[in-house]
Amino acid sequence: MKIKPRKLLKKYITIIVVIIIVIICYIRVSNGEKLFSWNQNSRIDNYTNAVNIDEAGAVESSDSKVDIAESNSGKIEDTQKEQTYNDQIILDNNKLNIFFAYVGQADCTIVTINGKTMIIDGGNYNDGKNVSQFIQNYNLEKIDYMVATHADEDHIGGLINVMKNNNVERLLIPREGSNAYYYKKLVEEAENGETEIINPTMGYTFQLDDAKCEILSVDKGMLVQNDAEDNINNSSIVLQITYANRKILFMGDAEEEVEQSRSWDDVDIIKVGHHGSASGTTKEFLNQVLPEYAFIEVGKDNEYNLPNQYTIKRLEEVGAKIYRTDINQSSFWVSINENEIIVEEIELNLDNS
């Protein structure tokens, strides 16, 4: 059968278009680009010219929140909305990358450098799926260190799902709080996955590639004498990262008693303790650490009215630039090298409350 010239021309054009698409995809992959990406709106804050998000204006929050819906059977089910991530997050292996993630009234921080990854807390139990998915979307093949600062659900709960769905090499967890439900569940998952479980003591150090990590406080729940029970917040693992002559301090939920229990170095960045509660971040403590950047992981319109206004005032008095996850229900991506600290607000909402 003879093929008409017009049909033959269409056939050739189709073949040529397909070949061009294949060539473009090959070039993009060769250059390390992603073929499929997510949307982002962000603001960049350079080390020498930082912008306080309270003054910079609002950014529309992501529609990526996960709802909990009640089914006809009366059971609670997860109904997952489409999660919006970012097409501009290209991890530079020559920098330390830190994500202060929004997980509502909870804590979750992810640290990565040169293929090495650490997660510090994972939000509430229901947040775990979103946190785990975020890690997998960025092809972070394994978690070298999982740090469960203490046994409260809003720190340790989400780590259970992360442990279940990711390759976790080591779990750092305090001894105090071991009778708590979520503590037991996390340790159980770790044992099932053959994850090494470490109960660190003060002074314990480890390396995350070129970043030195040191435990500055842990298991100090009995610092307050005559307490009816241990103060689980003060059992928090307090972790300091040193990289490229810069120091980043993660306070967990540690309170005033921990702050008074030792001397502190000045730092560049602090993850403020206990969601900005008035129970910590004292004037005496801040006069020692003198942070340039302060990150508060806290839920929007939370019932505890956090962060406390006096905590904010004390941070302002030492000149800290304050970044709060509750303002826009957003997260912050910090990248660090010897020359600069860059802070970028990203529309990343991992809250599933």
Image (cartoon, grey):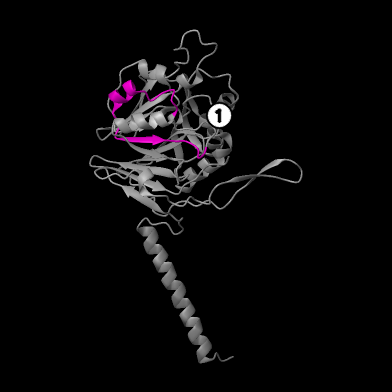
Rendered location of residue 200, percent (x, y): 43, 20
Q: Residue 221 location, x and y as percent?
A: 47, 16
Q: Helix or strand or loop: what does disc 1 sit on?
A: helix
To which quarter of the image does residue 236 belong?
top left
Q: How many marks?
A: 1
Task: Name the image quarter holding the N terminus.
Answer: bottom right
Residue projecting furthest to the top? 226
Looking at the rendered structure, the kind of residue marked 1 is: Glu
Residue at image mark 1: 153
Instruction: Check the image and report above or below for 153 versus 117.
Output: above
Whole-percent x and y of residue 279? 44, 22
- Up-down relation of residue 298 to residue 251 (above or below): below
Q: Is residue 147 left or right of residue 46?
A: right
Report x, y in % for residue 330. 45, 45
Direction from residue 321 to residue 273 in the image, left or right: right
Residue 280 falls in image quadrant = top left
**Is 11 covered by the magenta stretch?**
no
Asked whether residue 116 is in view, the answer is no
Question: What is the span of residues highlighted in magenta in the rendered image?
Answer: 277-301
Neighbor class of circle 1 (other Cα within 10 Å; few <14, some 14-19, many 20+) is many
Task: Give the quarter of the figure containing the C terminus.
Answer: top right
Q: Nearer the viewer, residue 325 or 17?
A: 325
Identity of the residue furthest to the right in this view: 73
Give the camera-side residue of 116 and 234. 234
User: From where the camera sits, is residue 130 visible?
Assistant: yes
Q: Relative to the observer, which residue lies in front, 238 or 229?
A: 229
Camera-side residue: 351 or 311? Answer: 311
Residue at image position (36%, 16%) is 260
Name which residue lies at 33% across and 16% down: 262
Residue 295 among magenta residues: yes
